[in-house]
Structure formats: C-alpha cells, structure tokens
C-alpha cells in the first residue's frame, strides 16, 4: 500500500511540474505585460519600462527559454516571482488560497457524498416516482450552465429576503465589511455569504455524481455476489450497503479526480459572480492584465489540486478494492 501511494505521489509531482511549465510557457508566449505601460500619460521612458520588466522576469524581448529558466529556478524555492506592478505573487496567493479552498472543499465533500447517496437511492428505487424525480432534476441542473444557476439562486435569494424582510441570504462578498459583533454574529454572517456560492457548486456536483452512481449501482444490483449475500441470510439493506454500494463506488472514486477539474472551472465563475476574491477571480484578472507570473501561479495551484484529487481517488480505489493493495 505504501509503495502504491509513493509511486502515485512521485508521478503526481512530475505531472505538476510538466503542467506548471506548460502553463508558464503558454502564458509567457501569449500575454504581453509590456502593454500595461503603454497608453500612460505621460508615457514612461523606454529605459524605465525595460528595467521594470527585466526586474520581474517579464521582458518579452528576453528569449522565452531564459525567462522560463529564471521562473523554474524560483519555483524550486516556491517563489512565483512578482506581478507586473511589483506586488508579490506569493503574498497574493497566500491571501486567496484560503478563500478558494473554503469553497472547493465544502462543495466537494457535500456534492460528492450527497450525489452518491442520491444516485444509489435512485438505483434501488428504479422506475419509481422518486427515481424519475431525481432523474428529471439532475438533467435540469446538468443542462443549466453554472453561471446561469448562480444568477437564478441570486434571484431566489433576493425574493426570500424581500418576502421575509430579513437578510437571510447574502450574495456579495465573503463577509459584510465593517460588521461588528461577537463570534457568533461574525460566524453567522460568514455562513450567510457562504450558502449561495456553495449551493451552486453542490447542486451541480449532486447532479453529476447521482447520474454516474445510479448507473454504476444498477450494474451491480443484479450481480451474483449480491444475490449470494442475500441467500446466505444477509438482510437486503446490509447486502446493498456492504457489497453492492462498495463495489459501485469504485468507478465513482476514479471519476472524482476528473470531475474536480470541472469543479475548479465552475468555482472560477462562482467567485466572479458572488464577489469572492479567490484564485478563480484572480486568474481572470491576471489574464486581463497580462500578468504572466500570476497566471502561471494559478495554473500551478489548479494542477496541484487536480492531481491531489487524483491521489485521493487512488487511495479510495485501494481501500475499496483489496486487489489494488495486493498488487502494490
């Protein structure tokens, strides 16, 4: 088991390095930090522009292989350099990572767990009203773009707030600026701001996982080992939970890593719509400002998260299927 995880960890580190390198080269080749100095009145001297770009490893007149070498050397020290305006990329990343992780971790846990349970429930009750209702709701959510779903939830939140006369839901920012009060007042305020963006991502995750898990569960329900377990005296509920669901979870564990990439894309839209100053919003701003080092840093962060999700799915796979542990 330890060798299995070490091999996966080593391959993940190599893949992160490759993904981060490709992201940097693509950003350095396509973005133009020099444009941030153009159009100013009065225009800065050309020598000043060259000096500023060179100091931050953003000079497009320097061969890209040299810029990549300097960037990779800093990356080994976990130093992502500076933005075009001189601010530290590391400092900005440290401020924004917590914001994104708070949203992604909660949405991942709730969405995947609830999606698996809903999908398994629909499979067990195949062709009944509850199964049809779950299928209909899942396809409606899947056919709705995440940014449209976010706007619809905002409209619902405004309606609820107007109907109750109380700000039940907050839909701008992570917290209310200048709010005073004790721990519980601030905690409730954070929760009110967290509900809508989290719910947007969770609904999409439930819809995806429920469809995937329902199909996997249906493939298992008619298997011989499930019927044998019931023939030996196990109650149907025990046989379904201990044997059928565990086996049906194996493909979902693999699917988890691939789906996490879609969750990151959705989080980028959500942070922008709801005014969360996380990594997704920063990525959009960085592309708009031609900030090569910031774009590369966000891409590296995304690669680490996706491959970490892959490592977790491998671990879950090994736990669910003993043959993996034996083979490792």
Image (tube, rainbow, N blue to C red):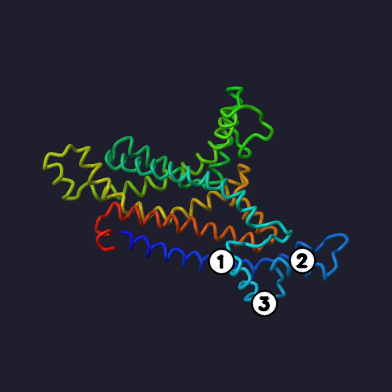
Q: Is residue 153 above or below residue 57?
A: above
Please tell me whether mark 1 or mark 3 is closer to you in this view.
Answer: 1
Q: Picture coordinates of residue 146 (x, y %)?
A: 53, 46
Dot 2 or dot 1, earlier in sequence: 2
Marks 1 and 3, Cα distance to the nearest angstrom?
A: 21 Å
Q: Pointer 1: what residue?
A: 76
Q: Picture coordinates of residue 144 (x, y %)?
A: 50, 45
- At x 67%, y 66%, the residue is 31
What is the crowding at mark 2: few (fewer than 14 residues within 10 Å), some, or many (at least 20)?
Answer: some
Q: Pointer 2: what residue?
A: 52
Q: Picture coordinates of residue 57 (x, y %)?
A: 69, 68
Looking at the rendered structure, the secondary structure element under dot 2 is helix
Q: Is residue 143 left or right of residue 97?
A: left
Dot 1 or dot 3, earlier in sequence: 3
Looking at the rendered structure, the secondary structure element under dot 1 is helix
Give whichever of 37, 155 is nearer the camera: 37
Circle number at residue 63: 3
Give the image quarter of residue 50.
Answer: bottom right
Dot 3 or dot 2, earlier in sequence: 2
- At x 59%, y 60%, the residue is 297
Q: Is residue 271 left or right of residue 52?
A: left
Tag 3 and tag 2, C-beta contact below 8 Å: no
Marks 2 and 1, Cα distance to the nearest angstrom?
A: 23 Å
Q: Is residue 24 left or right of residue 62?
A: left
Please state, as top left, top right, bottom left or bottom right, where the C terminus lies in the image: bottom left
What is the crowding at mark 3: few (fewer than 14 residues within 10 Å), some, or many (at least 20)?
Answer: few
Give the image quarter of residue 48.
Answer: bottom right
């Amino acid at each position: 088991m330890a060798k299995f995880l070490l091999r996966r960890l080593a391959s993940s580190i190599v893949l992160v390095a490759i993904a981060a390198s490709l992201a940097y080269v693509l950003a350095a080749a396509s973005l133009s930090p020099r444009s941030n100095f153009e159009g100013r009145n009065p225009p800065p001297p050309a020598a000043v522009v060259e000096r500023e770009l060179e100091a931050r490893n953003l000079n497009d007149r320097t061969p890209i292989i040299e810029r990549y070498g300097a960037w990779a050397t800093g990356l080994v020290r976990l130093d992502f350099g500076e933005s075009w305006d001189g601010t530290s990329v590391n400092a900005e990343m440290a401020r924004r990572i917590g914001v994104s992780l708070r949203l992604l971790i909660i949405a991942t846990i709730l969405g995947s767990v609830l999606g698996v349970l809903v999908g398994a429930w629909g499979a067990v009750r195949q062709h009944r009203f509850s199964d049809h209702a779950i299928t209909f709701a899942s396809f409606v959510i899947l056919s709705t773009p995440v940014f449209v779903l976010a706007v619809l939830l905002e409209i619902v939140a405004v309606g609820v707030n107007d109907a109750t006369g109380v700000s039940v839901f907050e839909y701008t920012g992570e917290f209310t600026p200048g709010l005073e009060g004790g721990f519980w007042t601030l905690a409730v305020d954070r929760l009110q701001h967290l509900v809508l963006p989290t719910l947007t991502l969770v609904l999409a995750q439930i819809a995806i996982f429920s469809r995937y898990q329902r199909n996997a569960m249906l493939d298992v329900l008619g298997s011989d080992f499930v019927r044998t377990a019931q023939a030996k005296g196990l109650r149907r509920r025990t046989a379904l939970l201990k044997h059928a669901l565990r086996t049906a979870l194996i493909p979902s564990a693999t699917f988890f890593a691939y789906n996490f990439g879609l969750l990151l894309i959705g989080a980028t839209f959500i942070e922008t719509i709801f005014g969360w100053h996380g990594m997704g919003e920063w990525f959009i701003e960085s592309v708009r400002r031609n900030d090569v080092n910031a774009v590369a840093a966000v891409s590296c962060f995304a690669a680490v998260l996706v491959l970490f999700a892959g490592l977790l799915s491998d671990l879950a796979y090994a736990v669910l299927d003993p043959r993996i542990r034996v083979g490792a």
